[in-house]
Amino acid sequence: MPSTPSTLTSLSGPCGAQADIRLVVTDMDGTLLDDAKRFPPGLRPVLAELRRRGVLFSPASGRQYATLAEQFGAEGRGMVFIAENGTYVVRDGEELSSDPLDPAAAGRLVHCVRGLAAGGVDVGAVVCGKRSAYVERTDEAFLAEVRKYYVRHRIVPDATAVDDEVIKVALFDFGPAERTTAPALADFAGTHQVVVSGEHWVDVMNRTANKGAALRRLQRDLGVTPAQTLVFGDYLNDLEMLDAADWSFAMANAHPRVIARARHLAPSNNDNGVLRTLARLLHLPPAVF
């Protein structure tokens, strides 16, 4: 893997040939979406063209499946959604794979968050089930953040006793999660996957669960190779899926560790980097992009 990722301007296939891409996987926040959480202009015709060419488009996000399905609406038909950081993979409402969390571990995490909050950390837990997300905090500031990523959520008196299959516990920290909440979860890091998925978010999952593991299972199921896979990401929860693709792109706005890990560098999320890269690599016609 190169120490300095190649940029879009220097990118081309052999002898300028179009890359043989069968699968396009993109993170959402900070990658496909701009900082205002908007889809890039031109996405709809690009999706239609990819579908026409038989290229599968797959959003891979820490977001809930219900949230992703609502965001894409009818355009999501036939897409594979790698939701909840790879713990829940769904296509047209049918589960393809999941990696449920032990309920006892989920309960310990909730108790840990309660302890952090009692000690003065402005943090709350989101227990992520397949049917819904569950929270104990009721203040509007916290719920406003939850609604951005979990359209299907419920306030419960005790998040350690939900009637659902739990796949992840997400922690929202109003401060810098990488410096406050994440270090406080050191006891879980030895047995579980603890990943900083955004400036204020930390996700805790099984050690076997991440976007990359979900992507590799999908590649096996589809018969798609890493050489036929194109991946975009910007944050630490994207690292493993970058490793699963020969065409791995860090956004220009990405975390330094992501830029170091990727093979290539795309323009930023605010500069329509995903679509610009697709247009260049797949020789999309001007009418499409």
Image (cartoon, rainbow, N blue to C red):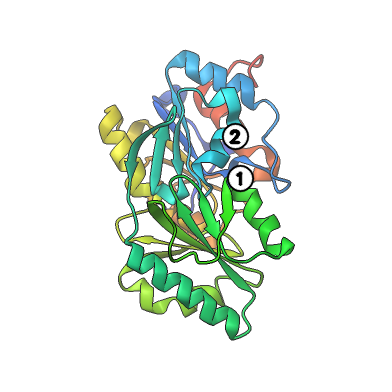
Residue in the foreground of this view, choosing between 39 and 147? 147
Image height of 179 relative to 78, above or below: below
Amino acid residing under circle 2: Glu
Secondary structure under badge 1?
loop
Image height of 230 relative to 55, above or below: below
Q: Which x, y percent locates residue 152? A: 57, 45
Residue in the foreground of this view, choosing between 81 and 144? 144
Q: Which x, y percent locates residue 148? A: 65, 49
Q: Which x, y percent locates residue 25? A: 46, 37
Q: Is residue 211 visible?
A: yes
Q: Mark 1 sits on what residue?
A: 151
When asked about the image quadrant of residue 289, the answer is top right
- Please rate how many residues cluster around mark 1, counting C-alpha atoms within 10 Å: few if below 14, some from 14 to 19, many from 20: some
Task: Answer with left or right where residue 53 lies relative to residue 143.
Answer: left
Q: Mark 2 sits on what residue?
A: 70
Secondary structure under badge 2?
helix
Q: Which x, y percent locates residue 254? A: 58, 54
Q: Are marks 1 and 2 in contact (CB under 8 Å)?
A: yes
- Please rate how many residues cluster around mark 2, counting C-alpha atoms within 10 Å: few if below 14, some from 14 to 19, many from 20: few
Q: Is residue 244 visible?
A: no
Residue pushed farthest bottom? 119
Q: Earlier in the sequence, mark 1 or mark 2?
A: 2
Q: How many marks?
A: 2
- Residue shown at the point (65%, 51%) measured from the top left: 147
- Residue shown at the point (57%, 70%) measured from the top left: 177
